[in-house]
Amino acid sequence: MAKRILITGAAGFLGSHLCDRFIKEGYFVVGMDNLITGDLKNIEHLFKNKCFEFHHHDVSKFVFIPGELDYILHFASPASPIDYLKIPIQTLKVSSLGTHNLLGLARVKKARILVASTSEVYGDPTVHPQTEDYWGNVNPIGPRGVYDEAKRFMEAMTMAYHTYHGLETRIIRIFNTYGPRMRLNDGRVLPAFIGQALRGEDLTIFGDGSQTRSFCYVDDLVEGIFRLLLCDYVNPINVGNPQEITIKDFAEEIIKLTGTSQKIVYRELPQDDPKQRQPDITIARKILNWEPKVNRAEGLKRTYAYFKGLSNDELYKKDHRDFTKK
């Protein structure tokens, strides 16, 4: 019988790619999403697949999955500032209550669980590049704290279940990732720049553009997740592309890629926005035999082709989602 895996956040950007990968690897995938930031169009191609089923459910509430489970991937969470600033309580709950619920489910099912942490646990780092033994520089009561601290709690809860209950756990710290199925209006720099270029708008940089990011193509990240789930390493591990670039240089790359004539405009840098972000992937190279394969030029070309294929309605669509306060 095929191994069964539960993937939360299945209708999101990363979750949907993970569903594709594990089905391709011969797994039976149980996808779960409350669709607060996910979109069913990301997984609609799987609905007729006999190796996939979907549950519309919020993991912050009790989670029940009938039958056996071999693995759980916890990827349910808002992941962009525009989302978690609108829904701060849900952001905190999905990585605290949701993680607790899924760790409990993993314990009952005797399943191995991998949780999706983030480079944001490092906050605005004072160590560069960021290594897994760096504890971070996070403002717990700042606007980004609802996401940063939720993920830090997720890691602590996961390790507690590992040490106290002997649960098989894995923790991945994900750095900036991009590729097809990102939302144009999700507020992250890459879709924001490409969306502005496609609409003929000026590209907006927050701050002076000297802050850095490191962008990993989604296929590379999924490969790292797959290898981590199946290995024996239990401590947090960075997975991302260590090739660093300033936001200003990145904006100029997007202008060149899209062939637009728009200029760059500057706005005030948001509070607690990280000034630098670059993963040290020494452990990933050693433990997972992993490093990114898709260079940024190729990854951006694929991503731009995806966004260019969107309809005008999608290109100009505003974010009208109704975030109910809870």
Image (cartoon, rainbow, N blue to C red):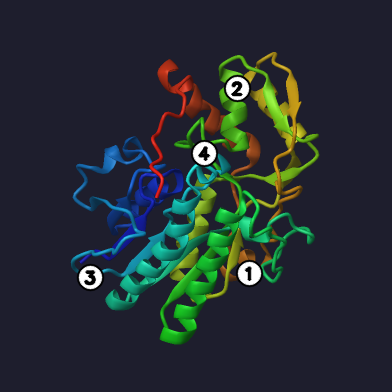
Foreground: 279 or 286?
279
Quadrant containing the N terminus in the rendered view: bottom left
Residue drawn at the location 52% of the way across and 46% of the way down:
84
Q: Read off the residue under disc 1.
A: 286
Q: Secondary structure at mark 2?
A: helix
Judge left or right: residue 88 versus residue 320: right
- 259 or 266, nearer to the observer: 266
Specify the quadrant of the image occupied by residue 166. Answer: bottom left
Q: Earlier in the sequence, mark 4 or mark 1?
A: 4
Query: Residue at (53%, 52%) from the top-left corner?
Result: 221
Identity, as a three-letter code, of the amino acid under mark 3: Glu
Name the residue beneath numbered marker 3: 68
Say which of marks 1 and 2 sits in front: 2
Which residue is labeled 4 in the image? 179
Per the rendering, the mark at residue 196 is: 2
Point out the frontmost of discs 2 and 3.
Answer: 2
**Marks 2 and 4: which is nearer the front?**
2
Whether residue 258 is situated above or below residue 63 in the rendered picture: above
Of mark 1 and mark 2, the one earlier in the sequence is 2
The answer to whether the residue labelled 1 contacts the one labelled 3, judged by CB atoms less than 8 Å apart, is no
* Secondary structure beneath label 1: helix
